[in-house]
């Protein structure tokens, strides 16, 4: 069955099953917001054949990933999610199945975080375009910002980096010869297809922030890669950083598959791991890493500099200066 | 200069001039929201060559119209705007000028209502797609809903209908022979290119709602045409309506241009007038219409029925039953 066969009204009826019934059918959705909380808003757009493709991503994975990316942005601000809207543009000969699977994937991810789809728009277009806006609420004093890093802060990452890039590589090259076990392959691919926004980090973080009386919390998510995150934070905070390459947590499977240089490259520039990077005083950072476990690590220090240095602990290699040119440039091709 | 020549970062720098500087550069925008207010969210997607085209709409008009459409949805909920996000997908060979003009048009409209662009996303795509999400705040007791119409309510529209459709016709057929003066033509075209969201209606409405102790306010905007609005309200409220065709306010210029049937057709099905339709007790409605002036009118009554009847006051024509099939069907071609 194709979208054009059931029309906009028919499609809406099917998709409304994925939304809370009390919120549908007006010009806008109405949501309560708690007293003394600020609203946090974030938007992401995904385009067919650019941000996803049929070879690597099923409709339900596109749905999951788009929801996860937006929830990750909320987590990166310290916000609890309230809901998302979905602005969907698609050709009339898209199958209804595809659209249902997209919404199924979204709600599978959102359900884990009690987040509803509260509205949206569906329009005809020659190409599939999924625009998601997520909104959440945050206490003003717990808002996580990029521009709060201070010299001496430890740089924490909440988990492994490069795994999503590794999974993508396996999906793009199904006949790639590796020493990976099927189990490892599946794990890497799942990391790419079903990333988890790190909203679970927030309650742990609040505990530590409160006990250490930290006033300004610095951080962001690593959706565009670890290098991008540290460079963005340093740029916003007008500081530099010294990163110890060997401290960057990598997926175990990389050892039997990639050279150390490749693995580091995936971690720095791969992106889409949707972990958080946080800059906090040393003691608080150590406590956070130990409470989070699961590959959370301190990977470096904020320094008084205009550069981000990548250092080799064993001094085998000279310091590198990180820059974004190796990162993803959206309009360059 | 093309978008691909300056890249995402270059484009972002230009577009940030259109946003408040204190809100930029984090994973999300943070906005205060007043105590005891609910959040209202609404999303619209516009696609090149479907919702706008170079023949009829300049980039700045696309910007104005997309902002106006979203603010109109907020007005239709009774909400004061807090901000919008813009999810923009576009080909690398779009000119930077086009994108700047788009944002200029948006901010020209938004400025009139003190509404900032608070964030968004810019991605590459083979086709231009503009997804806007607007959010506002509303007192729970002043939320305007579609499902609150009651038998006996008068049906108010806040202004002329069909003018936007008329303007579009003139734009699509520049050599069309009409008796219209240049002044009239320009007025109709401007109505199409620069529609005004009726946020100005709200303070007047609140005054009347308060003085008449009205608890449930029913209404929506007429962005998809007057017929669509009344049918949606009746469907949501499980009531019918009797509309008097001769009471529907039409643009003066129609008299020297269109037959009465054509004019009525434009008003009912043309869409994009972005007026409000409100269903209120008779006395309150009369007061609202007189306070609003400017072509606001009572066009009919909510009745106990499952139909929406279009009646001819002079009984020249039999009653018609309105239905949406003549309205716009997004996926039908």
Image (tube, coloured by chain):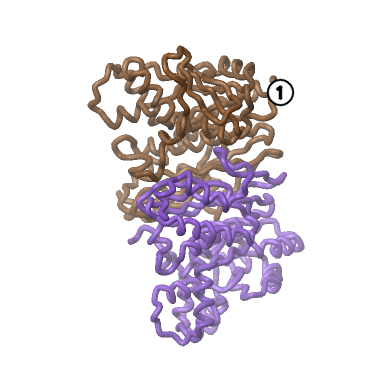
Chain colours: A purple, B brown
Task: Say how many tags the image has.
Answer: 1
Q: Is residue B267 left or right of residue B237?
A: left
Q: Secondary structure at mark 1?
A: loop
Quarter occupied by residue A249: bottom right
Q: Is residue B246 left or right of residue B55?
A: right
Q: Is residue B147 left or right of residue A87?
A: right
Residue at 71%, 38% (x, y): give it.
B36
**Along the line of sight, the residue nearer the viewer: A156 or B158:** B158
- State the residue position of label 1: B213
Residue A283: horizontal and vertical position, in percent? 71, 70
Residue at 30%, 16% (x, y): give it.
B181
Residue A316 lies, with reference to residue A125, above or below; the image says below
Residue at 59%, 69% (x, y): give it.
A157
Residue B55 lies, with reference to residue B155, above or below; the image says below
Residue B175: horizontal and vertical position, in percent? 23, 26
Q: In the rendered structure, the residue with mark 1 lies on which chain?
A: B
Residue B212: horizontal and vertical position, in percent? 69, 20
Is residue B322 visible in the rendered structure shown here?
Answer: yes
Categorize mark 1 by other alpha carbons within 10 Å: few (<14), some (14-19), many (20+): few
Residue at 35%, 51% (x, y): give it.
A126
User: Looking at the image, which residue sits at the far front?
Assistant: B318
Work out which quarter of the rendered image holds the C terminus of chain A and state it. bottom left
User: Looking at the image, which residue sits at the far top?
Assistant: B314
Work out which quarter of the rendered image holds the N terminus of chain A and state it. bottom left
């Amino acid at each position: 069955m194709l979208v054009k066969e059931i029309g906009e009204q028919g499609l809406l009826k099917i998709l409304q099953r994925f939304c809370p019934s009390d919120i549908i059918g007006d010009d806008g959705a109405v949501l309560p917001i708690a007293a003394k909380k600020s609203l946090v808003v974030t938007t992401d757009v995904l385009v067919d054949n650019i941000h996803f493709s049929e070879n690597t991503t099923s409709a339900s994975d596109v749905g999951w990933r788009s929801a996860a990316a937006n929830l990750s942005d909320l987590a990166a601000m310290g916000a609890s999610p309230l809901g998302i809207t979905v602005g969907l543009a698609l050709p009339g000969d898209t199958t209804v199945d595809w659209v249902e699977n997209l919404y199924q994937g979204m709600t599978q991810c959102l359900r884990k975080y009690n987040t509803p789809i509260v509205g949206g728009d569906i329009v005809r277009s020659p190409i599939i375009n999924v625009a998601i806006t997520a909104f959440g609420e945050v206490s003003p004093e717990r808002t996580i910002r990029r521009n709060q890093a201070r010299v001496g802060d430890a740089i924490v990452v909440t988990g492994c980096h490069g795994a999503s890039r590794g999974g993508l590589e396996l999906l793009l090259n199904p006949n790639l010869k590796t020493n990976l076990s099927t189990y490892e392959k599946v794990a890497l691919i799942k990391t790419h297809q079903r990333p988890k926004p790190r909203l679970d980090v927030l309650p742990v973080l609040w505990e530590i922030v409160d006990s250490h009386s930290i006033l300004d919390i610095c951080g962001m998510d690593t959706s565009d890669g670890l290098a991008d995150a540290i460079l963005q934070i340093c740029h916003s905070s007008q500081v530099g950083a010294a990163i110890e390459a060997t401290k960057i947590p990598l997926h175990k499977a990389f050892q039997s598959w990639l050279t150390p240089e490749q693995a580091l490259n995936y971690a720095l520039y791969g992106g889409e791991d949707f972990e958080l990077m946080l800059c906090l005083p040393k003691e608080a950072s150590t406590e956070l890493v130990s409470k989070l476990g699961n590959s959370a690590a301190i990977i470096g220090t904020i320094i008084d500099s205009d550069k981000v240095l990548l250092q080799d602990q064993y001094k085998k290699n000279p310091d590198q200066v990180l820059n974004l040119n190796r990162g993803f440039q959206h309009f360059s091709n």
